[in-house]
């Protein structure tokens, strides 16, 4: 309403034909289909277009990967103030300058965010996840791939305040152990995707917890984790919503042969693959991929 009130005043002074012929609501809808770069360009055309382009409703989904070298804290804070409760999806993949302070501002001002990609944001620590836990209860997807400072405390915080979480990626967060995974499993039973490549402190206990508490799991990737997780793959199969199709679960003896192993599972109408890569590839655990990836196998 505030935007339309401002537009009524500005449009009265704007002689541009397009502003007179098209309803303000329609112009706002058109702007909603533009990407970040286009919106910024349109904002420079006129006062009326500036109001339209910078309206929070047009900034529900933002991907700043193409600007990763330029994105710093103040930019995130300005975006947070501009978007407010409208923001639903934000990708800061590769933005290595982003720190905890900016993410706390984001969490406070954008409580409705559902999808956050923080892949490669190496300065982030547990403080960021604590902020998400406190302010972002609607968070569903979180990518922390490569955020090496993240620890079990982050997963425990998420389990307390982000119980709607369905997808999480903690790959290469080497400080995370099975204790954090257990807390996450208990607090976030809606998990459908759990990816933790390269987390060598995650062991079989984590697999058991995922199987016990997260019955909607569709994707699990523990590639490069502790080798004893292999023996507990059966725990995932035994969950009520998983059914083993073929072949049998890999054993240590099968792994030692150096063969490339696979076990395909079905979950309702979807298919999942659990694969073990050979020692020559430097991996000693397993990973799961979605049905879309299995079709070409």
Image: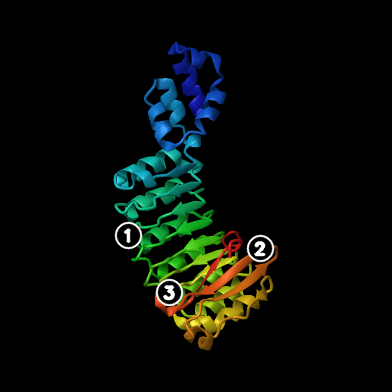
Q: Which sits earlier in the primary sequence, circle 3 or circle 2?
A: 3
Q: Which mark is residue 122?
A: 1
Please say which color scheme the image uses. Answer: rainbow
- From this view, report whether residue 111 is shown above or below residue 32: below
> Residue at 56% across / 59% down in the picture?
164
Q: Which residue is mark 3?
A: 224
Q: Which is closer to the viewer, label 2 or label 1? A: 2
Q: Which sits earlier in the primary sequence, circle 1 or circle 3?
A: 1
Q: Which sits earlier in the primary sequence, circle 2 or circle 1?
A: 1
Q: Which residue is mark 2?
A: 270
Looking at the picture, how far across and down is residue 122, in whole percent?
32, 59
- From this view, report whether residue 221 is shown above or below residue 205: above
Q: Are marks 3 and 2 in contact (CB under 8 Å)?
A: no
Classify residue 191 by image quadrant.
bottom right
Looking at the picture, how far across and down is residue 220, in whole percent?
54, 69
Looking at the picture, how far across and down is residue 246, in whole percent?
65, 75
> Residue at 46% across / 32% down in the picture?
55
Q: Considering depth in this image, is 181 or 35 the residue closer to the camera?
A: 35
Using the rendered image of the protein, determine whether residue 257 is visible from the camera's viewpoint: yes
Q: Which is closer to the viewer, label 1 or label 3? A: 3
- From this view, report whether residue 191 is shown above or below residue 65: below
Look at the numbered disc 1 and give the secondary structure of its residue. Answer: loop
Viewport quadrant of the C terminus: bottom right
- From this view, report whether residue 17 is shown above or below residue 85: above
Looking at the picture, how far across and down is residue 218, in whole percent?
60, 65
Crowding at label 2, few (<14), some or many (≥20) Cα neighbours within 10 Å? few
């Amino acid at each position: 309403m505030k935007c339309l009130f401002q537009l009524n005043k500005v449009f009265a002074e704007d002689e541009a034909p397009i502003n007179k012929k098209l309803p303000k609501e329609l112009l706002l809808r058109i702007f909603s289909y533009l990407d970040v770069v286009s919106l910024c360009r349109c904002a420079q055309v006129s006062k009326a277009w500036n109001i339209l382009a910078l309206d929070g409703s047009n900034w529900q989904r933002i991907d700043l990967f193409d600007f990763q070298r330029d994105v710093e804290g103040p930019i995130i804070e300005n975006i947070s103030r501009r978007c407010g409760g409208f923001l639903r999806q934000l990708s800061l993949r590769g933005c290595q300058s982003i720190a905890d302070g900016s993410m706390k501002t984001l969490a406070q001002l954008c409580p409705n965010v559902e999808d956050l990609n923080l892949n490669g944001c190496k300065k982030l620590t547990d403080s960021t996840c604590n902020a998400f836990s406190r302010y972002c209860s609607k968070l569903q997807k979180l990518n922390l791939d490569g955020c090496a400072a993240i620890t079990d405390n982050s997963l425990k915080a998420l389990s307390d305040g982000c119980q709607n979480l369905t997808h999480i990626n903690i790959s290469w967060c080497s400080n995370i152990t099975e204790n954090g995974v257990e807390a996450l499993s208990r607090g976030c039973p809606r998990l459908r995707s759990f990816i933790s490549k390269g987390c060598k402190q995650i062991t079989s206990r984590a697999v058991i917890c995922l199987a016990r508490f997260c019955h909607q799991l569709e994707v699990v990737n523990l590639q490069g984790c502790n080798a004893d997780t292999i023996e507990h793959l059966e725990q995932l199969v035994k969950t009520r919503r998983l059914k083993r199709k073929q072949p049998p679960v890999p054993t240590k003896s099968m792994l030692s042969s150096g063969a490339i192993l696979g076990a395909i599972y079905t979950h309702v109408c979807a298919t999942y693959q659990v694969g073990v890569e050979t020692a020559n590839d430097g991996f000693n655990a397993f990973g799961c991929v979605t049905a879309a990836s299995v079709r070409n196998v």
